[in-house]
Amino acid sequence: MEEELCYSTVIFKPRDNGKPTESEETVLYAEVKRLDSTLHTTLETSAAQCSTKEFLPTKDCLTEEEGSSTPVSPACRRAAVFLGLLCFLLVAAVTAVSIFHYIHMSKYNNILAQQTKERADNLQSLEVLKQEKARLMTNSQQMNSTLDFIIHRSRFPVDKYCQSTGNGVRCTPCPQNWIQNGSSCYYFRRPTGNVWKTWKESQEYCEEYGAHLAIIDSEGEQEFINQHTNFDQRYGYWIGLSEKTEKTWVWINGAQLEKGFWVTGPLERYMYCVLSMPSKDPQKSWKSESCFSSNKWICEVEVLTWPTFLQVQQNHSNPSI
């Protein structure tokens, strides 16, 4: 390391009685001296004294060897420790809050999922209850209709409608051996041996079932009747039409005839009734004949609607002879 040098300049001027003259030359002396070791010792001592004082260091407190480092005071150390502890506590608090939030949200999601499932189950149960209510109301209406049908008949052959099975009692909309067509049931009596009946006897037989001799009021019904009577071309079937007065034909329910399906026109005589004859042309099959003659007959009764739990499929097989 190069030694420090001290430079100084000294000027000497001659005086004449204390007054300088302009012509006199100025003499300049220069002296260069080496800085001795005493000065180094003094500087080092001053730097050591500065570093031991209890105040914030300045640039004057720095030595040549430690020009880039700054001493830290105890107050700064305490502040740093306090800030570090505070940061740790904040991180711990944030972590705890995050964990609590996660646990809370998990419970909330579980509760929400359970409530959603329960709501779906409740809606499904409500739909089932609505369907059950509709079914019970339908059964109630059917039961009331059935009771009304039974009450308005003096004799009701329940054994002809209902049978006991291994699954309980089951009932059909038509009596046994009757055929359903639309809203009515029909019985085509084909007598064997001497079982033939007059018009009045035939009506009495039908009344045992709560029925009456057939009332035909449409072409479709007439075609149905002809289809099930076209077995024997020689004999006809009593229907519920008779002559009340001359030229006045009345159905068994009191309604007057509006349209007929006569073969050649009725014979207008006293106590004449009408037979439906088997015919290739259903529109021409009626024939008038004395009500006292014996013939086969056709009964008609309204279809009986039973409650659903009692219903069975109607047997559409042909009636027994």
Image (cartoon, rainbow, N blue to C red):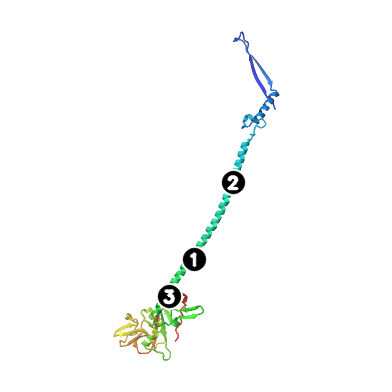
Q: Specify which label sits upstream in the sequence, 1 or 2.
A: 2
Where is residue 308? Give x, y as percent: 46, 74
**Label 3: element kind:** helix
Residue 73 rendering spot, x and y as whole percentages: 63, 35
Q: Residue at x 61, y 39 (%)?
A: 80
Amino acid type of the residue that numbered disc 1 sits on in the rendered structure: Ser
Q: CA distance from mark 1 to mark 3?
A: 26 Å
Q: Residues within 10 Å of mark 3 (few under 14, many from 20)?
A: some
Please give the label number shown on residue 125: 1
Q: For residue 24, what is the image quadrant?
A: top right
Tell me, yes or no, if residue 93 can be seen here.
yes
The image quadrant that residue 176 belongs to is: bottom left
| Left or right of residue 172, residue 36 in this image | right
Nearest the eye: 119 or 294: 119
Residue position for label 2: 91
Q: Residues within 10 Å of mark 1 (few under 14, many from 20)?
A: few
Amino acid type at image mark 3: Met
Q: Quadrant of the N terminus?
A: top right
Question: Relative to residue 200, is residue 125 drawn left or right?
Answer: right
Which amino acid does the dot numbered 2 rest on?
Val
- Residue in the picture at 38% in, 86% down: 204
How many angstroms separate mark 1 from mark 2 (CA)?
50 Å
Point out residue 7 in the picture as x, y percentages from the top left corner: 65, 21
**Disc number placed over residue 187 in the picture, else none:** none
Left or right of residue 243: residue 24: right
Q: Secondary structure at mark 2?
A: helix
The one of 173 and 110 positioned closer to us in this rendering: 110
Q: Which residue occupies the extreme left position in the image?
A: 246
Query: Sequence-wise, which precedes: disc 1 or disc 3?
Result: 1
Using the image, determine if residue 100 lies above or below residue 57: below
Farthest residue toward the bottom? 194
